Image (cartoon, rainbow, N blue to C red):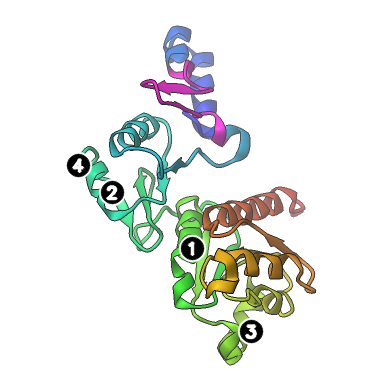
Amino acid sequence: MTSPDALQELLNAVATGAISPDHAFSKLQHLDYEPVADFANVDHHRALRTGFPEVIWGPGKTPEQIGQIIHSMRQRTPVVMATRIEPDIYHQVRSQIPDLLYFATARICALIQTPTDSSGMPCPQYSGVITLISAGTADLPIAEEAAITAELCGFRVQRLWDVGVAGIHRLLSQRDRLQAADVIIVAAGMEGALPSVVAGLASCPVIAIPTSIGYGASFGGLAPLLTMLNSCAAGIGVVNIDNGFGAAILAGQILRTAARLHPTQP
């Protein structure tokens, strides 16, 4: 009941007399938020306000708490996600929810209750493509968190993995794909130079994710974060260290806004 189409359908049903106002009220009584036991308040209204439903942050929650929150959300949200879920936690939650899926590299578990494409992911709902780039294989968990988040939110994604600046020819061989991208997300650790290079080659927004990959002087991702913030290339936005989820949502908001502002064709 959190999607605009579902809400419109409910209001139309009341207007035509197909359902009673009391029945509609029972469906809407938790529209803003719903208490789950004594530890959570699920924000069912978030998709109507922001375009994306609430997502469960896994760390700090017990498997039982995660399971109860998913049970609450599945009644009203076509795709339910939980991030930073370790394998042992997933198996415990799956004992409560047998149809729960797990994306191991991204550490995301999800319920998909909407039509899927040949890959098993939700059918794309939005125009445009989010291109994901990782500097190295060690950055893949964060890059995949962004990729899976974007796909679960209904966006098309293309992946370019292990094309860091230490072998710049790997990236340059993908120049056509960079030029064709609508939004690019770049995950890089070490010195974090890759987003600057990408932004010098692409004509679309670039979202940089500093990862906590590197030797001691990278300070757990602080060094690439500062590099990205100080980039001499224009058009780069920087999210927090290891925040693949936040980068995907920002990319999605860019594409959603672009679609909304696109001039109507005659």
**What label sits on residue 95 in the rendered view?**
4
Left or right: 5 with respect to 193?
left
Q: CA distance from mark 2 to mark 4?
A: 9 Å
Amino acid type, label 4: Ser
SS label for mark 2: helix
Q: Position of residue 36 (x, y in %)?
A: 39, 24
Whichever of labels 1 and 3 marks the residue nearer the N terminus, that label is 1
The residue singled out by tag 1 in the image is 142
The answer to whether one can see residue 173 in this image is no
Q: Position of residue 61 (x, y in %)?
A: 37, 38
For the residues labelled 4 and 1, say whether their Cβ atoms are less than 8 Å apart. no
- Which residue position holds label 3? 175
Placement of 255 over or under 73, stated as above or below: below
CA distance for labels 3 and 4: 46 Å
**Foreground: 28 or 24?**
28
Q: Position of residue 44 (x, y in %)?
A: 49, 29
Q: For marks 2 and 1, give the CA distance.
A: 18 Å
Q: Is residue 46 magenta?
A: yes
Q: Which residues are magenta?
A: 27-47
Q: Which residue is mark 2?
A: 90
> What amino acid is at disc 3?
Arg
* 81 vs 58, nearest the viewer: 58
Residue nearer the viewer, 9 or 233: 233
First along the sequence among labels 2 and 1: 2
Vertical comparison of 211 with 6: above or below: below
The kind of residue tagged 2 is: Tyr
Residue occupying the point 28% across, 49% down: 90
Tag 1, which secondary structure? helix
Q: Earlier in the sequence, mark 2 or mark 3?
A: 2
